[in-house]
Image (cartoon, rainbow, N blue to C red):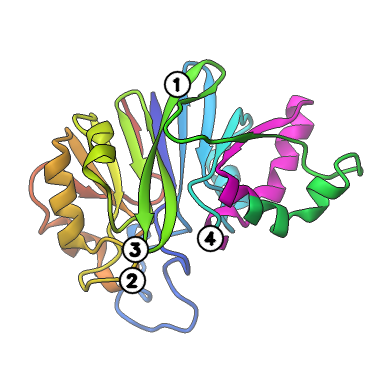
Amino acid sequence: MKVTFLGTGTSQGVPIIGCDCLVCTSNHKKDKRLRVSVLIETHGTNIVIDSGPDFRYQMLREGVKKLDGLLFTHGHKDHIAGMDDIRAFNYISKKKIDVFATDETQAALRREYQYIFESPDYPGVPQINLHTIHHPDPIYVNGVKIIPIKVMHYQIEVIGFRIGDFTYITDANYISPEELEKVKHSKVLVLNALRHEKHVSHYNLEEALEVGNEAKCGLVYFTHISHQLGLHKDVESTLPPGFHLAFDGLTLEM
């Protein structure tokens, strides 16, 4: 399994428009973060979790020419705004793309992309097979088993995903003990860590470290990072062994 971090930033990305803080004006590539997304390549299958506003550029940057499944964590704009660009993969593969989302996220997709659902045969419209995630039932992409993990993003349910020994959770500020059991002993856990200060709907760094320790995973990478967390090199140097900040373009071989 190969995992590529397509984006590791918060909803506004880093740098933020109009901000002249130390992080937003940094020239270091690890301080520049597109909207959060990840590509998983396993058993000849390419799976992307969330297609945000930067999806087109992320696909071009990584040279992705094949997409088998698109999984959505939830319906916020920074996670769904790029779905129209799967048209390119329709053209390459000559087939529909399998898209997986809960009923709630599907409602957001139908609002955002009404033309896909109201005129599915219109030339150039993205072609999708829409599948409903029924937690806790597993889903499958080309036979690859994926376990949905329900977390809370303030009052919104968000779906994390475990594929083999890799677990991905973003936009969370609470995971129940029952759902955390599904995460435990992953070789790699990806978890959101927004900033140092507490936040109403995201883990801060301290809380993410606590969850990471409780999950007893081999390695923990933090994502969905805002400019308020600080410079990558400074924060990375403070983390305990086994914990790291992810960055755009980082690849993991499992």
Disc on the earlier residue, 2 or 1:
1
Residue lying at 33% horizontally and 71% vertically, measured from the top left: 227
Q: Position of residue 229 (x, y in %)?
A: 25, 68
Distance between mark 2 and mark 4 Cα atoms: 16 Å
Q: Relative to the observer, which residue lies in front, 65 or 126?
A: 126
Residue lying at 18% horizontally and 49% vertically, measured from the top left: 211
Q: Which residue range is magenta in the image? A: 77-106
Q: Position of residue 124 (x, y in %)?
A: 86, 44
Distance between mark 4 and mark 1 Cα atoms: 26 Å
Q: Position of residue 43 (x, y in %)?
A: 47, 16
Dot 2: few (<14), some (14–19), or many (≥20) neighbours within 10 Å?
many
Q: Is residue 29 magenta?
A: no
Say which mark, if any, is on residue 202. none
Secondary structure category for the residue under label 2: helix
Tag 3–tag 2 contact (CB < 8 Å): no
Between disc 2 and disc 1, the foreground one is 1
Say which mark, if any, is on residue 145. 1
Q: Which residue is labeled 3 in the image?
A: 31
Tag 4–tag 3 contact (CB < 8 Å): no
Secondary structure category for the residue under label 3: helix
Secondary structure category for the residue under label 4: helix
Say which mark, if any, is on residue 227. 2
Distance between mark 3 and mark 2 Cα atoms: 8 Å
Distance between mark 2 and mark 1 Cα atoms: 35 Å
Between disc 3 and disc 2, the foreground one is 2
> How many numbered marks, from 0 up?
4
- Identify residue type, mark 3: Asp
Residue lying at 66% horizontally and 48% vertically, measured from the top left: 83
Q: Relative to the observer, which residue lies in front, 175 or 25?
A: 175
Disc on the earlier residue, 2 or 4:
4
Q: Which residue is labeled 4 in the image?
A: 78
- Identify residue type, mark 1: Lys
